[in-house]
Amino acid sequence: MENKVYLTGIKPTGTPHIGNYFGAIRPALKAAASFEARYFIADYHALNTVKDPAELRRNTYEVAAAWMACGLDPEKTLFYRQSDIPQVFELSVLLNAFTAKGLMNRAHAYKAAVALNLEKGEDPDSGINMGLYTYPVLMAADILLFDADFVPVGKDQVQHIEIAVDIAEAVNRNYGKELFRIPQPYLEESSQVIPGSDGRKMSKSYNNTISLFLSEAQLRKQVMRIVTNSQGVEEAKDPDSCNVFSLYKLFATPEEQAALAARYRAGGMGWGDAKKELFDKMNRMLTPIRDRYTALMADPSVIDEALNRGAERARQLARRKMEKLRRAVGL
Ligand code: TRP
């Protein structure tokens, strides 16, 4: 596995939350130890929806600072901004020539946007830009330019990888050689669902997220707001059906989990106490991450330096690949 390329794009569209940490950031950081990892900030993908320059810039810093604060070492893991690699965009034009329009018509995100328009009785393409329509081509360029073997993504992105495979195979077939390595989606086997503050899956679209970088006071407030059932203090409680406990498991040692589970079952412990335990363990783990994040955001030149160095190395790889491709296609 050592030299298999493991690549993913991070869309900078808001501060990462606890669900992002356990679902994406932590697994990616673990994988960086056993693969040749390449992580980039998909800022051109974000431009499709974020049109305010200050917001896009801030989102990019936030997501870079978040990953670095959580432990990404830019000296070991290739870490760059998509927009710093012009070859991505050159390749995406090349790929356009091999991408059936019908393939884009079938992409989920585009189809969902059209369906929503029709539901509202609007023009099917209302508010849909070409960036959204051709989103999978740009994503294919991100992946194919860097010879990715594995692309860790959530279920919602699997179709995009399949599209990248389709396009890569069309190119390889036409030139009769393996110009592109065929990527594979890499699904986390322990895709445990992280509950949000209302008990549903933590997700920005449910408005139930707990940000990774809340101040201690804000974090306490958010934890106290987690929805529980209406059992009284004296009643025995079931840890396995409780979202406070599900969150607790992510932050506590096995011994601490067993101890709290026993208090649940014994009765005599109110929800306020359970939440206090949860807050303590969350705060213990998040404090050093929050401190590093705050320091990086206070001096983003450290982030810029890391991303610029990463881009330099990424451009070298990209230049070589693009030269080979241009020759092969006759440009
Ligand atoms: N589409 C991905 C998302 O929304 C982000 C992304 C862009 C990406 N380019 C990529 C992911 C290439 C993996 C590989 O989360």
Image (cartoon, rainbow, N blue to C red):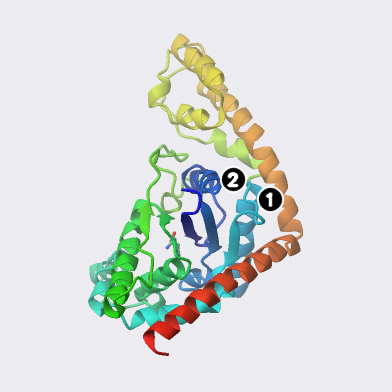
Q: Nearer the viewer, residue 265 or 194?
A: 194
**What residue type is disc 2 on?**
Leu
**Circle 1 sits in a helix, a strand or a loop, which is it?**
helix
Q: Is residue 231 visible?
A: yes
* Residue 210 x, y percent position in the rendering: 54, 44
Find disc 1 in the rendering and name its residue: 293
Position above or below: 314 against 323: above
**Vertical placement of 201 versus 132: above or below?**
above
Extreme residue toward the front, this view:
177
Q: Counting other residues with Cα less than 10 Å from the Cα at mark 1, is it few (<14), some (14-19), or many (20 or more)?
A: many
Front residue of this view, candidates 304 and 175:
175
Q: Which mark is residue 212?
A: 2
Q: Quadrant of ligand 1?
A: bottom left
* Residue 49: image location, x then y, percent: 47, 70
Asked if the residue at tag 2 contacts the one at tag 1, i.e. Cβ–Cβ closer than 8 Å, the answer is yes
Nearer to me, 165 or 153? 165
Tell me the amino acid under the disc marked 1.
Answer: Tyr
